[in-house]
Amino acid sequence: MQRYKVFTGNFAANWSANIMTNQTASPWDSQDSSEATVSAVTAAAEAAVAAVAAVVAAAEAAVASEGAEAFATVLHPRPPTIVSPSQNSQHNVGYVIPAGNCEPGAVVDIMGENGFFLGNATVNGNNWLYTKRWPVGQYAYRVRQTSGGEYSDLSEVRRFTVVNQKDVPSIMAPSDGATYKAGPMTIIVAAHSAATAVRLLSHDDSVLGVCVKVADGVWRFTFTWTAGVKHLKAVQDLNGQPRVGSMIGFYVNP
């Protein structure tokens, strides 16, 4: 006769619970837990990478903004303007004075057509001029300025020609290179005997005055000078054509 052991009470209940626990805790539960852990770590890593990328993007945007702001504040001056001499104009041998406008206090460089340096202009306020005696020939120049530590581009090319003309007026007084006292000055011009009019021009071809004929070939004009370096030339009307003489330069003291 076979005997069976019967479990009763708490012992039976505990045994039943253990059986159920062992049945539900399969090997797959451990694998699922590992996959969940890996997924969580991956998600956290991706989130960290995204956060770093956002920081980098913000930094790059800040740098770009600062660079754009810095670039915007660097303003190069415009090229100086050229007022005289006129484009393709013709002048008698002697002084020809390039002149124009610039930034106040700028350094103005006179450059050849191909960019070689000729010299520095004299700047007074926002005006510049370059005083030079030019021999016979054809000339072309450009100008640039430095203002606030920044260079401008070169200006357009200005061309002029210097010739040795005949039948042109000459200034007898004042004398070229002499020094005078500020105040009224009588200017004497020797002109062709057939000249019908004589005018006095400044370095920029502006008219200072119209002379009065006092004898054949002699004309006169009185002008009041202030202190400074002065340049003067005469132009006569001969046979219906203007003929411009050589420019002279002189000094006027206070």
Image (tube, helix red, strand yellow):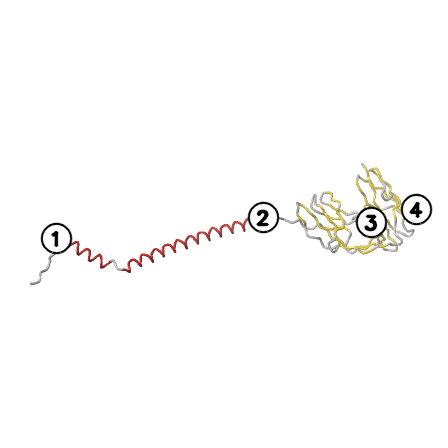
Amino acid type of the residue tagged 1 in the rendering: Gly
Among the two numbered marks 2 and 4 on one chain, the one whose residue lies closer to the N terminus: 2
Q: Nearer the viewer, residue 78 or 236?
A: 78
**Label 1 – label 3 distance at C-alpha:** 131 Å
Residue 176: x and y, percent? 86, 44
Among the two numbered marks 4 and 3 on one chain, the one whose residue lies closer to the N terminus: 3
Among the two numbered marks 3 and 2 on one chain, the one whose residue lies closer to the N terminus: 2
Secondary structure state at the residue bearing disc 4: strand
Among the two numbered marks 2 and 1 on one chain, the one whose residue lies closer to the N terminus: 1
CB within 8 Å, label 2 to label 1: no
Among the two numbered marks 1 and 4 on one chain, the one whose residue lies closer to the N terminus: 1
CB within 8 Å, label 1 to label 4: no
Query: Would you name the residue on which mark 3 appears?
Result: 133
Query: Dividing the image into 4 quarters, which one contains the C terminus?
Result: top right
Would you call the spot at circle 2 few (<14 residues within 10 Å), some (14-19), or many (20 or more)? few
Query: Would you name the residue on which mark 1 appears?
Result: 9
Amino acid type of the residue tagged 4 in the rendering: Ala
**Label 1 – label 4 distance at C-alpha:** 156 Å
Query: Would you name the residue on which mark 4 appears?
Result: 215
**Label 3 – label 2 distance at C-alpha:** 44 Å
Q: Nearer the viewer, mark 1 or mark 3?
A: 1
